[in-house]
Each structure stands twice: as structure tokens, then as C-alpha cells.
Amino acid sequence: MPELSLEELLFREQSKANTDMIIGIIMAKPALFDELFQLVLRNSEPVSRRAAWVADYCTEMNPGLLNDRVEQLASQIPRFGSDGLKRHGLKMINRAALPSENLGILTDTCFKWLQSQTESIAVKMNCMEFLYRVTKLYPDIAGELYDIIEIQLNDASPGFVNGGKKLLKKLSSRH
């Protein structure tokens, strides 16, 4: 039987068992991460979302896999359409060094998504984390971040309220 490509493996099924099996393959042969990363960047449903799930866990176990790819990922996140791609892309970025070339575009995108009525709580939480990291470099935006979070607390889910209040506390303690 011929060996299946990563794309074929991702299409077999969307399950934790299949994801864990693909993670095992990548971790055993890290050179395959580039192929997986290209599937993420393709921004094509459902393969990119499934690949992002695997890439997220691989970079959690081996953050070095993302080292030379941060700028590329940061430039593509604003183009991602699916919630899963946005969530996993931002989680990976939040574990890596901040991008320099694409910091502005990603910062703008995160502010937009954080204020959106349609973005998921998970995407918003990852946006808050990213933007908080940016405030350490650019303290001028901390006030804007604080205000955006505070405005949303009244109508937010318990998860957003919890994370938002923790971040507001961290932002307040820096002044």
C-alpha cells in the first residue's frame, strides 16, 4: 500500500486519534512540518483548518518549528476565513516571538476581530493575548485595548468576562 501524504491523512477523518497520529508522524520526522505548514497557509477548508490543529499542537511541543515561519504566519492570519484557522494561527503566534515586519497588520486585525460581533470567544481571547503582548512594545495602545475590553464586558460570555477582567488587571497594574 502506498504511503499517504499529509493532506490525505488529514482528509481521512477529523478526530483526536487521527490528529494525534499525524502529530506523532511530524514529531518523529520534523522535516515534514514544512509540508504541514504549507497546508495551513493554503487557507482552504477543511484541510487548512485540520492542518492548523496539528501544527498548533506540534509547535506547542516543539516551539522551534515556528522560528523561521512567524512572519509568514503573521502575514497570512488576517486572510484566514475559518474560526479554527484564526484560533490556531493566533495560538501559535502567541507562543512565538512577536513578528516585526507584519506586526502592524496583525495588530490591526486583532483589534478588528476583538471588536467584532461575529468572532468566536476563542478568537477574541487569542487576540487579547496577542494585543497585550504588543502593549509591552507599544504602551500607547494599552488604553485602547483596555477600553475595548471594558466596553464588551457587559454583554460578554463568562469566559470572555473572566479573561477580560484578568487582562484589565494586568493592564492596570502597569500604569
Image (cartoon, helix red, strand yellow):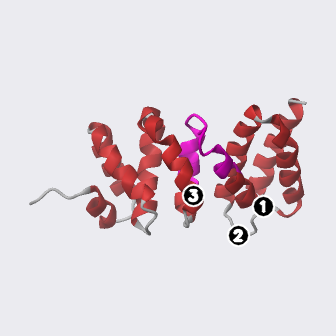
For label 1, the SS is helix
Compared to residue 156, the image places residue 162 above or below, namely above
Q: Give the residues drawn in magenta, as a range.
A: 87-107
Pointer 3 with pointer 1, Cβ within 8 A: no
Image position of 117 (left or right of 66): right
Classify 10 Å Cα crowding around label 2: few (below 14), some (14-19), many (20 and above): few
The quadrant of the rendering that contains the N terminus is bottom left
* Nearest to N terminus: mark 3 or mark 1: 3
**Point 89% across, 57% down: residue:** 151
Amino acid type for the residue under numbered disc 1: Gln
Q: Which mark is residue 86?
A: 3
Disc 3 to disc 1, how far (Cα)?
15 Å
Residue that protrudes farthest toward the left in the picture: 1
> Residue visible at 57% across and 46% down?
91
Which image quadrant is residue 158 in? bottom right
Residue 62: x and y, percent? 42, 34
Say whether residue 28 is left or right of residue 148: left
Q: Which residue is mark 1?
A: 115
User: Disc number at residue 118?
Assistant: 2
User: Which is nearer the eye, 163 or 129?
Assistant: 129
Q: Does dot 2 land on a helix, a strand or a loop?
A: loop
User: Where the C terminus falls, by quadrant?
Assistant: top right
Q: Main secondary structure of the magenta part?
A: helix
Residue 99 is a magenta residue: yes
Mark 3 residue type: Lys
- 168 and 33: which is toward the camera: 33
Task: Inspect the image, locate mark 2, and give the three-letter code of the amino acid beneath it.
Answer: Thr
Report the Cα–Cα distance between label 2 and label 1: 9 Å
